[in-house]
Structure formats: structure tokens, C-alpha cells
Amino acid sequence: MSLAKPAHAGYFFGQPVTALAGRLREGSLTSVELTQAALDSIERLNPILNAFVQVDAPVALAQARKADELLAQGVDLGPLHGIPVAVKDNIDTCDYVTTYGSAHFDGFKPERDALCVQRLREAGAVIVGKTLTHEFAYGPTGDRSFQGAARNPWDARCITGGSSAGSAAAVASGMVPLALGTDTGGSIRIPAALCGVVGFKPSFAAVPLEGVFPLSSSLDHVGPIANCVEDARLLFEVLVGRACAPVHNPRPLRVGWITSGSFGPVDTEVDRQVYQAAQQMFGEALQDTAQLQPLAADMKDTLLVLQRAEAFDVHAERMHEAPQLFDQEVRERLELSQEVRGWHYIRAQAGQARLKAAMADVFEHYDFLVSPCVPITATEIDARQIRVGEQDIDVRAAVLSHTSAWNLTGLPAISLPVGQVSGMPVGLQVIGAAGEDDRLLEVMAKLFVRS
Amino acid sequence: MSLAKPAHAGYFFGQPVTALAGRLREGSLTSVELTQAALDSIERLNPILNAFVQVDAPVALAQARKADELLAQGVDLGPLHGIPVAVKDNIDTCDYVTTYGSAHFDGFKPERDALCVQRLREAGAVIVGKTLTHEFAYGPTGDRSFQGAARNPWDARCITGGSSAGSAAAVASGMVPLALGTDTGGSIRIPAALCGVVGFKPSFAAVPLEGVFPLSSSLDHVGPIANCVEDARLLFEVLVGRACAPVHNPRPLRVGWITSGSFGPVDTEVDRQVYQAAQQMFGEALQDTAQLQPLAADMKDTLLVLQRAEAFDVHAERMHEAPQLFDQEVRERLELSQEVRGWHYIRAQAGQARLKAAMADVFEHYDFLVSPCVPITATEIDARQIRVGEQDIDVRAAVLSHTSAWNLTGLPAISLPVGQVSGMPVGLQVIGAAGEDDRLLEVMAKLFVRS
């Protein structure tokens, strides 16, 4: 099988990290060469895709030389040693300017690395630059930031999805083999699905958030974007600071297909593609229904209240002192967010606990739940309305519709690139039980083969 | 020394529980006799004081007979066995109507006892009835409830303070020797101070709140009202389900007098009385200042946001469906409470954590802090403005001013009746470090002698 290839593809397209790691250790490749390949791909593709907002070749190459030296001395820091990695620009790095996608932080240089970045460095990874985030990660389209819109490698007129827009575009186009993203309502999985790569949101609090600019502390997650599940797992292991435990699956899998429409309208072709892919992956394990519709509206409302109140808490002073520095759409969201009442927030906190318990009950009957990750393919940049079936729907609501419930409930969820509709990527989302990150990654690594 | 005696005094005035418990065991007194004495005192005094809102003689006497039978069989459930106790009417009892002080719950009979009531029963106590609470415990004056105002045993024209209004009046007037109260901003300590009894608010979460009608879940506490520290300690031990641990005090006490005025204006005579009492109790251990003024305003604002948002969460449906059933003043407080913003609530939650840490730092230098419990004496019922020194101040703000900080920070605090000003009681408040309830009670039991 040959991989479908995006219109804009660089060195790392279709290159598994394990293969690169093997060549680094054989001596047939150096980290400096890999890093230079990343820099060359970025130089060629970034003017089209706007995935990176900060690149510093000397900084990146210095890290690569260090990695090569260590390997030459016999010091092997693990599978990411010497591998170029991109970091979303809402994650602090002490050697790259970190803007959080906002004019408020134009030129800002954090004093310290985020803890997840520190772990990346300790694993020997080479950080080649920072990738575009929707301003303050507060938007699922990836087309509103201080640095403009990121563009989809499969069609540069289209959005990448967001907010980890640049990280998904960077991996999908092969500028780098791996990237860090963050996910508060779907911000890793949405752009992964729309750009055709693997995006993994771990269980809540599995990866520490120190040094990641907060959007909503009840919902924020850090996780990997990669070409394949194995690579995502390698990066996840670095982020959590431990190896994934091998999982024994004594009995046949029970996989629940979330009844189409439970979380809102789905494009018919997307639905068909994703369902077919799920059937291929899970065979008879796929059970025809896991009816979550009664919980879906509750989950959406609850998340919205938590996210809004927490986001305004983060930005109140900026909204007071310099509202004009926000992108207009982000500012409008924050204006709404200011209005959330305290007692609604308290109820949403209680609701989150209740809904986590309800999902624990559902997972008594299933090992995994599956659904489309995003119910549509990437829309044109700045488009905000789209027709799905016979409904005119809001693009932002649609792209978030199938992912945000798993932020609220803190469950691990992965988006797998399972095909194209009209030449644009489509993602299958697989959701695991709370804390079952290792199991989800192990089983998906076995079952998912990119086509 | 003879005790000053309130204008309205019943059987239990000045009777320590330990003495009663001794006589029960000698056989010179029965629980039925004690309970009948309570019922007689209530019958005589309650028409004046309105301390009890539910009394049921057959229910009370049946408990007393049971207690006597058990003692006769040699089953001794501990020091409260056979002792009449009153329970504030915002605490569920399965055998007495429980109204929470509100027309919304006229005639309501809970299915289950609150956990603290269950513990009282397991300790053999005789629950003689329910005492008046300010409606839903949302007010510090004790003069607004479905059942009207409780009245001060020292002058029935005056408030008891609240919200544990009836419990304080019942103990102060000797209708019962012990009562349960709740305290969200001072609701045990304020009426204890204004009625001249001992009121103890334990550390946050020391006593379980199951079955206590919530006012504000970040701030609510259950605790004892008693004639003396020893009796308060006996009831506290039952509430926490363990004996207090004996405490060793290897070095001289360090007691900080909170600079007068730190928490707002104090009546000069009250201040003088309380300071003198503190000097008598602590002697040279009393250090002249613990400057908390910088924290005081922050604590007050933070508490207000938490309390308002949480109170409205509890009452939103009632405010929507039947606002006319609330007392007008309580309804007005709830209307304000509805407006609290979510992001303010989030900041208040963070503020509470920060202020708890700040107080832990203060207690590095002190064993106890002391201040007046209430900066004025009991005002006339329904009065809402009073002149203190040269300032016109709000009665409700004034009575809460010195107590609510210890709800926010969760520290144990006790009010001790240390004298009178113009014939009305005055309380000294002693605050301990977080979790140091046993130490506070032990030291106060040693040092405090009622005069």
C-alpha cells in the first residue's frame, strides 16, 4: 500500500521515528543531518503552510550537535535522542520566543522551559522551533492568531483545525516527525484529524501542565502529534516520564460505535469512511451502538461553563487593559466568558464529577468507544458556516462536537487518520477508559495500519 | 465568684455536664428527670426567647427512658449518655420536623438523621428539640426566620446573634446544657458571644456535614455550644467520633493579640473588657500585636465571593420558583449572590488556598491568636445600623467582622464569655492553628474560668 501524500510534503513524511532512531545509531545518519532536513523542509514549506512561528537554525543545530556528540560518547538518551521535534507556541521554551499566538506576548521569552519541554530535552530531542497556536489556544480552527492562519498541507486554502494548528501541519507535511500539542476541547485531535496524522490526548493530568499557558485548568491536556501510533507512544512515554506498561488483554475486545449523530450532525461521507475503517480495525469486536446522546448535551454545556469561566480568569487583566490586542473573534469569546455566573460554575464542577462517573459506568461495558473525530473535513480558512446534510451549522461548533466530551471527562482519546473524503483527511477517534492510556496506545499500535 | 445570671434562666444554667453525668451514674438523677427539667424550662422560657422551634415531649422522653434503661443495664455510652441536647434546625433529624428556618420547608420531615445527629444518638444524648436558625443560616443576627426572631436571654429586646440563634439562647438560658450549631461566617461564635456562652467552630472538615443543610460548602462547619469549655469538648469528641488527644506544651505559650481594628471598628468598652480578660488568661504569654490588617480585607472579600456563589447554587431553583417564600432580607442577599461571576469565584478559590497558607505562616510565630469575637454587644432586634465610636456601621457587617476570616481559612476558633458591657455579654475569641482543635480545647479548658 502506498500512502496518500499531501500536496505539500517534506523530508519526514512517512518516516517512522524508530527507523530514524535506528539509522542514527548505525551511524548512517546524524542528528545534525536530520535537523538540517527539518530546517530545509520548513524553509521550503512554511511560507505556504505557516506552521512554524519561530525557527532558529543555530539554536536547533547546536542541540543536534550535542545529541550527536553524546551518541558518539555512547550516551543514549532513548528513542527520541537526536530527533527533531516541534513545540506548540503556547508551551514555554527558554530558547525560543513564546507568544501564545497573541500580540500580548509579542517577543516574549520565558525564563524557564515548561516541564514537558524539559522532559523532551532530557530525552535528547532537538527542538527545531515553535508552531502556530490559535490565539491563546482559544479556538478550534487554527486560523486566528497574531501570526495569521496555519494552512492545511492537503489544500493550503483550508484550515488545519486547531488550536494545535502548526503542530499538526508540521507533522502532516513532514517538516518534523513529531510535535507537542495541547488539547482543551479537541485541540490535538481536531487538527490531527483534519491534517491526516495521529493525535493523542492522554488522560487528564497524566502529563504535567507546568509552563503550559492555561486555557481552562479543568480541561487542559498536553500530548503528542505523530505520523503513527508507535511514534505518538514514544513521545507520550517521554512526557509522562515512564515506559508504557505492557497490557494483557485476556478476553475479546468490546468496542462501542457511538451512534452517529449522538454528538451532533456528521457529514454522510465522513461517517461512512470512519465506520468502515472501524469495522476493518475491530471486526466483530465492534458493537453497533453505545448510546450516549442523553449525556452529550449535558457534557457540552458543562464544558462550556468551565472553559469560559476559567478562560476569563486567565485573561481578565488583559481584557481590561488592552482588549484591542486580542484577535476580534477571541475577544468576542472572552466577552461572553466574562458573563458566566459563579453558581453555574459550581454546578459545572459538580456536573463534571457526575459525568466522569457516568462514563466510568459506560466503560464497564466497553474497552473502547469509537466515533468520527471531526464530523466534517477541513473547511476554507475564515469560513464559519457550513452545510452538513440539510443543516446549516457553525464550523467551530461542528469541529469541536465530537472531541470536547473527552476533555470534560478526562478520558484518553486518539485520532487516527483513516482515509480521505474528496481528497481531505478524515479521522477515527478511539476513546479509552480513564487512566487506560497505555492500553489504548498498545492496542491501537497493533490494530491501526495507515493506508 | 458567683456567675452573672441572665434575666431568663432555666434548670441547666451553670450546670456542668460532667456533674450531671456523675449524678446520673450515682442514681441521684435520671435522664427522664433531666429531660423533664429541660421541657419545663423550655415551656417557661421559650415563649419569651423563641429559642426552640420544635419540641416534642413524648419523643424526647422516650429517648430519655431508653437512656435510663441502658444505664440500669450497665450500658454506658459515655459522658453525654442521658444528657438533653438541642439541635439547630438546619440539621436533619428524622424524628423532628426540620424547616431550615424557612417557609420553603414548612412541616418538612427528613428521612434520615444528619451524621452528626446520628453520632449524638450513638453517644446516648437525648435530643429535646430543634432550635431556631436564621433562615437557611444565611444571616448573623438570628432575627429573620420563618419562625421569627430568637431573643437574647440577657435582654429579650435584643438579638441573640446568629445564625445558630436558638442554640445559643437555649444554652445561655439553661433550657439545655448543650446544643449543636453550624458556623459559615461566625454562626456558632457570634451568638455564643452575644448570649454569654462558649461556642466552638472546629477546623474545616473536622466534623462531617452530611445531613446539614448547606450554606456554603467551602465555609460550613458544625460545632458545639456549651456553658464551659469542658462541655464543648465532650460534645466535640462525640461529633468527631474520637477522644481528644492530650497535648504536651513543652514551651511557654505564644499568644498574639490581633491589633484592635485590624478587622474593623470595635466598641471601646468591648475592646477593653476583652483585652483585660486575655491578659488575665494568658499573662506574659500575651504578645502585644499580630498585625493581620493587610490580610483582613482580602479575607473578607474572598469569603464573600465564595459564600455568595455557593449559596445561590443551593437556592437557585427556590429563587426561581418561589422567591416570595424567602424572608425579604435573605432574598435580597440571594439576589446579590446570583450576580457573582464565575471567574471571580475561581479567583476566590485560589485566594482561599493562598490565605490558608498565609495564616499557616502567621502560626509559625504564635500558638493562638486572640481578639474580640464580636466588636459590639447585642443590638435590638431588627436594628441594622449602629454607632461605634464615631462611625455609623452596619450591624450585620460588624457582628461578622471578627469571625469570618477563620471560616475562610478553616482554623479552629472558640468564643469564651469573658464579661459584660452594660449588662450584655462579651466574648473573647481564641484562634488556633489548622487542625489544632484538641490543643485549643485543652489549653482553654485549663485557662478559662467563667466569672
Image: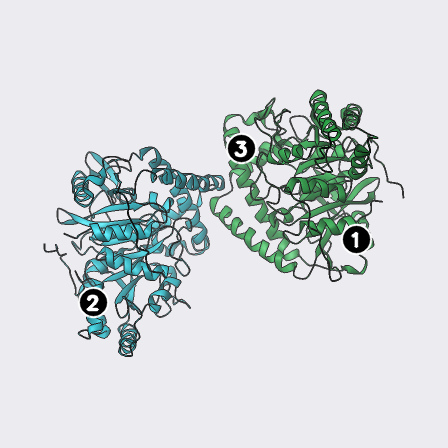
Chain colours: A green, B cyan
Residue B76 on image: x %, y %: 29, 72
| Residue marked by disc 2 | B20
**Residue behind mark 1:** A278
- Category of crowding for the residue at label 3, using alpha-carbon neighbours closer than 10 angstroms: few (below 14), some (14–19), many (at least 20): some
Q: Position of residue A388 (x, y in %)?
A: 75, 45
Chain to which the residue tagged by mark 2 belongs: B
Q: Residue furthest top?
A: A58
Which label sits in the foreground, 2 or 3? 2
| Residue at (73% x, 53% y) in the render | A370
| Viewer-nearest residue: A1 or A161 | A1
Residue B188 visible in the shown view: no
Q: Which residue is found at the position 56% from the left and 51% from the top?
A: A352
Circle 3 residue: A315
10 Å crowding of disc 1: few (<14), some (14-19), many (20+): many
Q: CA distance from mark 3 to mark 1?
A: 41 Å
Position above or below: A50 against B135 = above
Rendered-image quadrant of the C terminus of chain A: top right
Is tag 3's residue or tag 1's residue first in the polypeptide sequence? 1
- Mark 2 surroundings: few (<14), some (14-19) or many (≥20) residues within 10 A: many
